Image: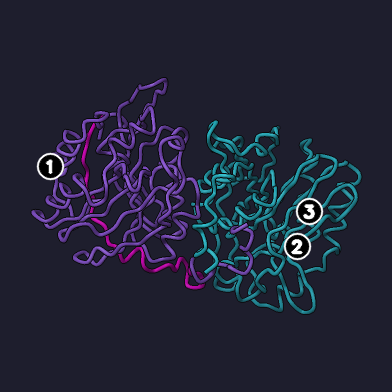
Chain colours: A purple, B cyan
Amino acid sequence: MNPVFGEKRLNVENALKLARKIESDLYVLPELFNTGYAFTSRDEALELAEEIPGQTTEKLAEYCRENDVYIVGGIAERENGRVYNSAVAVGPDGLIGKYRKSHLFYAEKKWFSPGDTGFRVFTLKKLKVKIGIIICFDWVFPEASRVLALKGADIICHPSNLVLPYAQKAMLTRSFENKVFTVTANRVGSEKRGGYKFLFTGLSQVTNPKMEILVQASRDREEVKVVEIDVEEARNKKITEFNDLFLDRRVDLYREILG
Amino acid sequence: MNPVFGEKRLNVENALKLARKIESDLYVLPELFNTGYAFTSRDEALELAEEIPGQTTEKLAEYCRENDVYIVGGIAERENGRVYNSAVAVGPDGLIGKYRKSHLFYAEKKWFSPGDTGFRVFTLKKLKVKIGIIICFDWVFPEASRVLALKGADIICHPSNLVLPYAQKAMLTRSFENKVFTVTANRVGSEKRGGYKFLFTGLSQVTNPKMEILVQASRDREEVKVVEIDVEEARNKKITEFNDLFLDRRVDLYREILG
């Protein structure tokens, strides 16, 4: 997607128009898909943010109810005067849960409060699938995807507004090391506001536990793509008859990770 | 390298002959470079293993002393009737330290005891550089490289006998996420013994914190390559004016990593 800054109604409509183009069980939208990315002040972010559930969540829920599908997407969230860079998981029965971005990138630190939800796994009942959510820059911290995989996520949904060229390659490592699928839904286009200019890198993709890109979108066009996966591939962590990627972990030697 | 199974004297001589071809401050040799890989029994491994320090370590130390250099290489280690898949760090003043492979791959579990040293950082005094060591399959566990980087490693030395095609790509992620250099010294050739056949994937490489391969060796020939690096690149963990990859870690949200 290439959202228009501040045009929430338009952006949500556009997201659902894209969704309508293709049949899928689970749709993943970019980070901050309803507001755009380049805020110039905390007040502006607060103004455009919504409570969860709120207007955008309701619109997504309506679509999910009518089409019997699931959507994950990033929106700006307001709560008690704070603003979070959040994502919602919505299904046929409405809001399933939300995640607040844990690792804020660049000037986001000026507008958003750091996420306090931790890394959460949600069950998509109809699909019998467990998903986790990370947002954009969270990708660089292996702990984020690791925690989700250890909690049983089959698929890591990754709403993004990536401006650096690294994540798409690194998500292959995240997929392999955790034996999960990943869905990176990245923005295209650019935003120039208040002295900041961001050029988003597109190339949305789905990766599998074998370190393969199953489908990838373009660098610069709005696009919706679908791929069929067998989530069972994410549930067997064995990679040889002697090796299970989770059972082989040497937790006794990892203490320094928690400082 | 393409060691000959069981021919320890020949393999050590060959390693030093390769080293002599090129001037470097730090040389990294493959996993089990002195013994070869495809053991067929624990007794065979015990027989070929050495104490550390022992014969192979002494030979490496002699080379380091004469040439004022450092060597990291993988050897089979014997201690109290156990065998470890270990690596030594050796310098002009002799043995600096050893690491015992934490995550054993495939049939290694039948010959070797799991490493009990944890992930250790060694200072190469003359170079004013800190190195950490992981061995082969350790690469797939992000915690291993993470612990070394958090302990201050500038360079992760990665003696390997890789048979799968994934590590060379994933080490780019390890470099970027930890902002360290990595040196994967992988075997070439194949070994067929006792019902097992291994084809090693070569492509030894050095990666930098910008997610680049600085130099890469061939898939199937013995070769020694050198690259000059500025270790300072590994000491600044900032990636934007607002982001430091280590200070940004949300240790409060990673608890599940330790189970």
Q: Marks 1 and 3, Cα distance to the nearest angstrom?
A: 58 Å
> Which contiguous range is marked in magenta?
A221-244
Task: Say which of marks 1 and 2 sits in front.
Answer: 1
x, y percentage for residue B19?
77, 43
Give the residue drawn at x 41%, y 32%. A163
x, y percentage for residue B221?
62, 45
Residue type of the residue flagged with mark 1: Lys
- Label 3 or label 2, whichever comes before in sequence order: 2
Give the residue drawn at x 41%, y 52%. A211
Q: Answer whether residue B117 is magenta in the image.
A: no
Q: Dividing the picture into quarters, in which one does residue A98 lie?
A: bottom left
Q: Are marks 1 and 2 on the same chain?
A: no
Majority secondary structure of magenta residues:
loop
Q: Are marks 1 and 3 on the same chain?
A: no
Q: Do the residues labelled 1 and 3 touch (CB within 8 Å)?
A: no
Pointer 2 residue: B7
At mark 3, the secondary structure is strand
What is the number of the mark on residue A21? 1
Q: Label 1 is found on which chain of the structure?
A: A
Residue type of the residue flagged with mark 2: Glu
Q: In this view, does B86 lie to the left or right of A150?
A: right
Residue type of the residue flagged with mark 3: Ala
Q: Are marks 3 and 2 in contact (CB under 8 Å)?
A: no
Q: Marks 1 and 2, Cα distance to the nearest angstrom?
A: 64 Å
Pointer 3 residue: B89
Closer to us: A15 or A78: A78
Task: Say which of marks 3 and 2 sits in front.
Answer: 3
Q: Residues within 10 Å of mark 3 (few under 14, many from 20)?
A: many
Q: Dividing the picture into quarters, in which one does residue A230 lie?
A: bottom left
Q: Marks 3 and 2, Cα distance to the nearest angstrom?
A: 22 Å
Q: Label 3 is found on which chain of the structure?
A: B
What is the number of the mark on residue B95? none
